[in-house]
Amino acid sequence: MANLHQSGTYRLGHRDVTRIGYGAMQLAGRGVFGPPKDRAEAIAVLREAVESGVDHIDTSDFYGPHVTNQIIKEALHPYGENLVIVTKIGATRGDDASWNPAFSKAELTQAVHDNLRNLGLDMLEVVNLRAMFDVHGPAEGSLEEPLSILAELQQQGLVRHIGLSNVTAKQIADGRKIAEIACVQNQYNLANRSDDALIDQLAREGVPYVPFFPLGGFSPLQSATLSDVAARLGATPLQLALAWLLKRSPNILLIPGTSSRAHLRENLAVADIALSAEDLAELDSIGTPASA
């Protein structure tokens, strides 16, 4: 079994968590919509993740919708005291599986209550407000109204910490005038390096950065250099992409997802991968840093 503590810990909200967590998105059906192909395996994956030392899980009630949260509750409730469940609001799913913005007071309030009910919680530990000005990536736009609504729900005791997802540096700065921002979750990986400066800034401020699609998302990372280094180290290319993220900055928290126990073990094993300065230099050459 992998030793997750070798990857270190980082403060998320008011708790220290191991830097390798678990993302629940793939527990839903194809396209993150509908039920999983194998519900029993989905439950087994969650239980093995926690038994292996994973102490933070990323989810959302718009995965499915409702599917992943209900599976998490079935698999893990009542939750251990050290388990942090992070969820997201700000979107709904259409009957055609589309992703649609949901920023009104009624929609955001309903989303918080749906998450509480489906997860079986009295308070949500961390809620990320996902910006939906552009589904495919960060785009400028005011988050003042939806973030103020979420801050009200926090004051009511329904939410402990607030994070932001799919956002720009300006939106983070503006958001801090309304609420303390506990974490930032954006797309970032070995090939997509547009948040390099933001990650470094957040690291200086002690704020965790959680990359989604750390392996490229629906179009997995493919690189001859990545494959060559992986072969040399006896790892898979995707394991190496995760190991690079751990080395990239100490404030990065990983949430790789899978619906397979075998793949879960591969993901967790990255805690044991050691990268030399030469390895890192080769891997760094794959992506184009934002400053380039």
Image (spheres, rainbow, N blue to C red):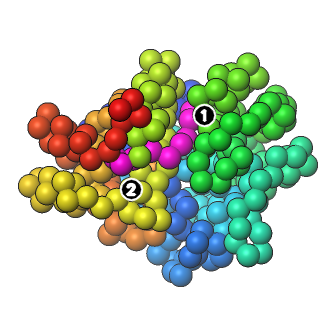
Q: Which mark is residue 168?
A: 1
- The correct choice, above or below, for 152 with respect to 131 in the image is above
Q: Disc 1 residue type?
A: Thr
- Give the residues drawn in magenta, as a range: 182-191
Evaluate whether residue 9 shows in this view.
no
Question: Mark 2 or 1, which is nearer the eye?
Answer: 1
Dot 1 alpha-carbon crowd within 10 angstroms: few under 14, some 14 to 19, many 20 or more: many
User: Pointer 2: what residue?
Assistant: 215
The x, y position of residue 97, in whole percent, is 70, 72
- The correct choice, above or below, for 201 with respect to 208 in the image is above
Query: Could you say which quadrant of the image residue 176 lies in?
Result: top right
Q: Residue at x 14, y 33 (%)?
A: 277
The x, y position of residue 290, in whole percent, is 41, 34
Q: Earlier in the sequence, mark 2 or mark 1?
A: 1
Q: Main secondary structure of the magenta part?
A: strand
Q: Secondary structure at mark 2?
A: loop
Q: Nearer the viewer, residue 194 or 66?
A: 194
Query: Could you say which quadrant of the image residue 136 lies in?
Result: bottom right
Q: Nearer the viewer, residue 213 or 287?
A: 287
User: Is residue 31 toward the left or the right of residue 189 in the image?
Assistant: right
Q: Residue at x 62, y 38 (%)?
A: 167
Dot 2 alpha-carbon crowd within 10 angstroms: few under 14, some 14 to 19, many 20 or more: many
Residue positioned most to the front: 292
Q: Nearer the viewer, residue 238 or 135?
A: 135
The x, y position of residue 63, in whole percent, is 64, 63
Q: Disc 2 residue type?
A: Leu
